[in-house]
Every structure is written in C-alpha cells, then in structure tokens.
Image (tube, rainbow, N blue to C red):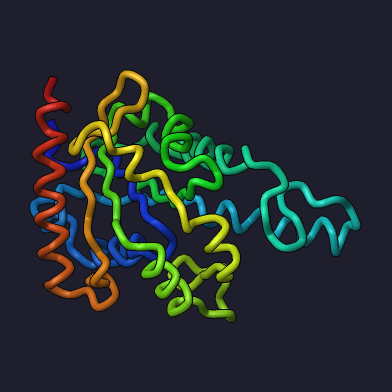
Amino acid sequence: MSDTFPVLILNARPAAGKSEIIHALNQIPTLERSARFHIGEMHIFDDFPMLWSWFEEDRLLEQVFHRPRLYTSIDRYFLYDDLWHLLICRLALEYEKWQRDADDSQTAIIEFSRGANHGGYRAAYSHLGETILSRSSCFFVQVSYEESLRKNRARYNPDRPDSILEHGLSNEKMERLYRQDDWDQFTSDDPDYLRVGNLRIPYVTFQNEDDVTTAGGDALLERLEAAFDHLWGLYRPQAAV
C-alpha cells in the first residue's frame, strides 16, 4: 500500500483557500510532501477552467458566429442547473483518462465549490462515481460566507479574470450561489466519514476563518500537517481492508 492519498477531493466556498493550499504544497519537494502530508506528485482537476471555457465559447458563438449561446446567459449564469453536475462528470471523465497512466505515487486532487443553490455537495458527490469515491478522501476548508466574500473581493484581478488565483465573482453572484451550502447537513451523520450510497469517504474540516492560507509559511504548513495526519489516520485502515 502506498503512503500517499490516491485521490483527494478539495472543497470549500470560493476564495476560502483551496488554491493557496495547493500552491503551498506544490512548493515542497515531492519526497518531503509525501512524508509530511501523504500527498504524492500532484495532478490537479479543477472545474473552474472548464466553466470559464464555456463563458468564452458562448461569447464567441454570439459575437463571431451570431449563434445562440449554449451554456450561459449574457450575465454568466448557467442556462440549465444540471450543467453544474455536468462539470462534475467532466472532472470524473478527465480523472479516468489520466488514471490510465498514473501510478501509486501520484495524488489526484479534485477541486470544486458547490452552494446549496445548485445542488450542494451531496448532489455533486453523487456524480463523481464509485471509481473515484472508493479511492477518495475529502479535505474541506471551512470559512464563513462573510470571509469567503472578503477574500473573493481581495483576490480579484480584472486583468486576469481567467486566472486560478485571481478570478472572482460579483457580490450578487456570491450571494445567490454561495451564501448557503449543505456541508453541515452532508456531514451531520458522522464526524469522520461522508456517506455516499454504500461508500464511506474519510474527511477532515480545516478551519481557515483566521486566513492562515494567505500568508502561508510555517504556520500554514504546520496546520496542514496536523489535518492531513488526522485524515490519513481515517483513510489508511479503510484502504487496507
């Protein structure tokens, strides 16, 4: 059995610190990262670039080809709610293609946010599929809606709206899409494992209301190490069965 997580699902509200955590882990040499955090060579699956490509394609269809938009309205809301689930299915498909050539030393990180407005985490997880979920652990970054809103404003760079680290949402979209989520309800049955069908997925909730992720450094790494040690303790016995 490998000493690294094969699949880590990384969830949180927008701007809560997911990308900052990935960035911090990426700066650590692979052998050290594997030993301290049980994270091997990382391959990131993020639905934001997929979502952004839909915005771009719709703009081109409308402005260049004078055809109807396929995915989004002019103000960048999805035309159909199940497109949120399509993004999750796309993440699962990309993972399945990548896994053909992956080895046990690598960790797939599947990153997304989901508000209650578009089905929440329970609905999203139901579309990941057993292949992924049976190998997964979950790392949830906990911040309040108010903190998510603050950091969303702070990180937004209008010159780089397609950037992973610098994109942002309008206050109106944050309110509509992410004020409410279902994380507390999703985890209410068990403090250690998510229940999806017949599967039990170990999870840990990483507290970031004090925004340890922006400054980074040793304070962040020490807190991450403790959280990942706890998560590994939940995952390892289950994986050995």
Q: Left of 214 or right of it: where is 167?
A: right
* 165, 141: nearer the viewer: 141
Q: Position of residue 37 (x, y in %)?
A: 14, 53
Total numbered circles: 0
Q: Residue furthest right?
A: 66
Query: Which residue is found at the position 44% from the left and 61% from the top?
Result: 14
Query: Which residue is found at the position 54% from the left and 55% from the top?
Result: 177
Work out whether 217 lies above or below 227: below
Residue 172: quadrant of the picture = bottom right
Q: Position of residue 22 (x, y in %)?
A: 30, 60
Q: Quadrant of the N terminus?
A: top left
Q: Position of residue 119 (x, y in %)?
A: 52, 40
* 107, 81: nearer the viewer: 81
Residue 62: quadrant of the picture = bottom right
Query: Which residue is found at the position 72% from the left and 63% from the top?
Result: 75
Q: Position of residue 108 (x, y in %)?
A: 33, 44
Q: Quadrant of the C terminus?
A: top left
Query: Which residue is found at the position 41% from the left and 75% from the top?
Result: 150
Work out whether 142 lies above or below 123: below
Work out whether 88 lies above or below 55: above
Work out whether 209 lies above or below 13: below
